[in-house]
Amino acid sequence: DAGVIQSPRHEVTEMGQEVTLRCKPISGHNSLFWYRQTMMRGLELLIYFNNNVPIDDSGMPEDRFSAKMPNASFSTLKIQPSEPRDSAVYFCASSHRGPNTEAFFGQGTRLTVV
Amino acid sequence: AQSVTQLDSHVSVSEGTPVLLRCNYSSSYSPSLFWYVQHPNKGLQLLLKYTSAATLVKGINGFEAEFKKSETSFHLTKPSAHMSDAAEYFCVVTSTSGGSYIPTFGRGTSLIVHP
């Protein structure tokens, strides 16, 4: 398996524009997580899905952020409109659902909003 | 709720000397614990995991960690540091919520290796 695949790797956009980040989890995994990493706050969980269903989005910072998982092999994180404070690295991770299973992370998307 | 505390934000060692990265956890039951490594501008890679089997866990690249329930600790060690070990290290506990299992990260420890 190629692992968790995120695209794009880098995104530079202007304030106010819509940004869509994409994630393909590892085949067979039934949990998917979106994290945001910044120097100030470290790694924050934004939202997670079990079997394509959003379970907890309490980590999503504002209504400008939304995430979907239309099927088991694809998820998106959308920011509309984007703001400079959204600049961060966004990671997607997937795992088998269970207490002893590790999460596998993608390479991340580095978002810069100018 | 489960949580982890990484006691040092930065650890600096000389190449060839031992490495100790400290992690304490808080959990109401026997936890699943992990260490991940992140090299600059890279994703997160699993180093090792503890899942209630052996308390001494061996991982990749010569790292190991010991689960100590009495001390609620899961410190990461390596006998001899290499320059390539310079990276950010994260201690992770699996939090449970309504049947879901969520990786919860510590703030990270930056390992600096001097020649």
Image (spheres, coloured by chain):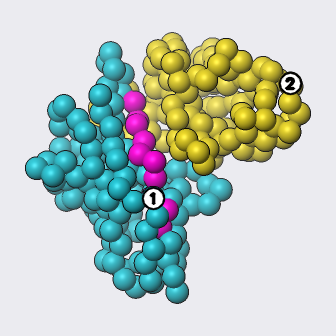
- Chain B colour is cyan
The verdict on residue B109 being magenta is yes
Residue A87 position, x and y percent, is 73, 39
Which residue is found at the position 65% from the left and 19% from the top? A62
Which residue is found at the position 78% from the left and 20% from the top? A80
Report the magenta residues as a range.
Answer: B102-111
Residue B98 position, x and y percent, is 32, 15
Judging from the image, what secondary structure is the residue with disc 1 in?
loop
Q: Residue furthest left?
A: B70
Judging from the image, what secondary structure is the residue with disc 2 in?
loop
Q: Nearer the viewer, residue A96 or B105?
A: B105
**What secondary structure is the stretch in magenta mostly built from?**
strand
Amino acid type at mark 1: Ser
Query: Which of the 4 quarters of the picture holds residue A81?
Result: top right
Which residue is found at the position 51% from the left and 18% from the top? A58
Q: Give the quadrant of the N terminus of chain A.
A: top right
Total residue callouts: 2
Residue A79 position, x and y percent, is 74, 23
Amino acid type at mark 2: Gly
Query: Which of the 4 quarters of the picture holds residue B103?
Result: top left
Which residue is found at the position 73% from the left and 35% from the top? A85
Left or right placement of residue A73 versus residue B36 in this view: right
The chain letter under disc 1 is: B
Q: Nearer the viewer, residue A55 or A112?
A: A112
**Would you say residue B56 is visible in this rendering?**
yes
The verdict on residue B106 being magenta is yes
Distance from label 1 to label 2 (Cα)?
35 Å
Res B9 label: 1
Q: Give the quadrant of the C terminus of chain A.
A: top right
Query: Which of the 4 quarters of the picture holds residue B63?
Result: bottom left
Name the residue beneath numbered marker 2. Answer: A16
- Chain A colour is yellow
